Amino acid sequence: MDTPLSDDSFFKPAELNICIFPHLREFMVVDSRATVPGGPHTYLLDTEQILDSDFYNKVEATISEIIRDTPRTFSELGYLPQRMDDAIRENTLSAIFRHVSGQAQMDNLPEVSIFLCVGPALGMTPAQINEAVQGMLGAQAGAWTIKDSLEQMERLMREERVLAKVEETDMANQAISGDDEMYYTLWSRMEAKQEPSEETATEPPFHDHGTEESRS
């Protein structure tokens, strides 16, 4: 069943739900499968646990293979960024699944949903967060698992809200001051126009230097 995040935004839970907080290194993986030992279960992970040397080696090998196998036409080269993005995403999901399942190899990944905690998700009420967590865990989750998962989700969302607000404030300040090259402000345009006139104003246009020297 879809979980409402706002009036026009919904999240559909799956077997494996990966909760990502863009400004945090921590993330949650909610495994709703009752068929796995200890399941349903929630894992609290750090990006360093997933993005290790083995992960980068696999990504580099995959991208190298993609580049070498791409036909030498400009049309095919245009698809390289998308294929690389797909390769990174696939390797990331595989690394997460290997970590939570303890399996070095897997034939098929379970159904996966990505719960990206941005926008409407950060504005969820406690009741909505509770509904989302219970929806991810499923009906067979134990009371302790639900309670612990809910506490972790609320903590991570609080931290994400704080960091997202800091970034929003920084971007607004940079836009006003004109320090950020991504923004074009009225102030920077006005300053650019004023600079030549200020230099000109320091000296009259028909100033006679020779007259001053002779008088001194």
Image: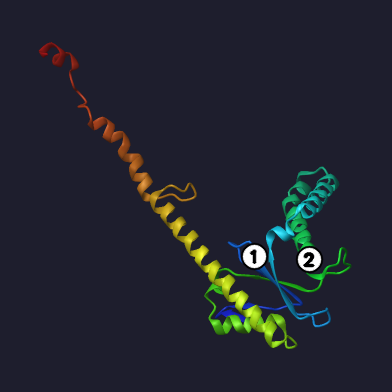
Q: Is 40 or 81 nearer to us in this picture?
A: 40
Q: Which residue is mark 1?
A: 26
Residue where numbered disc 2 is placed: 99
Crowd band around label 2 with a 10 angstrom C-alpha radius: few (<14), some (14–19), many (20+)? some
The picture places residue 202, in percent across and down from the top left corner, at 23, 30
Quadrant of res 190? top left
Point out the residue furthest to the top here: 214
Quarter holding the N terminus is: bottom right
Helix, strand or loop status at disc 1: strand
Whether residue 10 is visible here, answered yes or no, is yes
Q: Work out whether mark 1 precedes mark 2 in sequence or the reverse, and give the earlier one.
A: 1
For the rendered model, the colour scheme is: rainbow
Q: Is residue 37 above or below residue 103?
A: below
Residue at the location (52% across, 75% down)?
Answer: 123
Disc 1 versus disc 2: distance between alpha carbons? 14 Å
| Residue drawn at the location 86% of the way across and 63% of the way down | 104
Name the residue located 75 percent from the left edge and 52 percent from the top edge.
79
> On screen, 188 above or below 88?
above
Residue type, mark 2 in image: His
Q: Which mark is residue 114?
A: none
Q: How many marks?
A: 2
Quick check: 213 left or right of 159? Answer: left
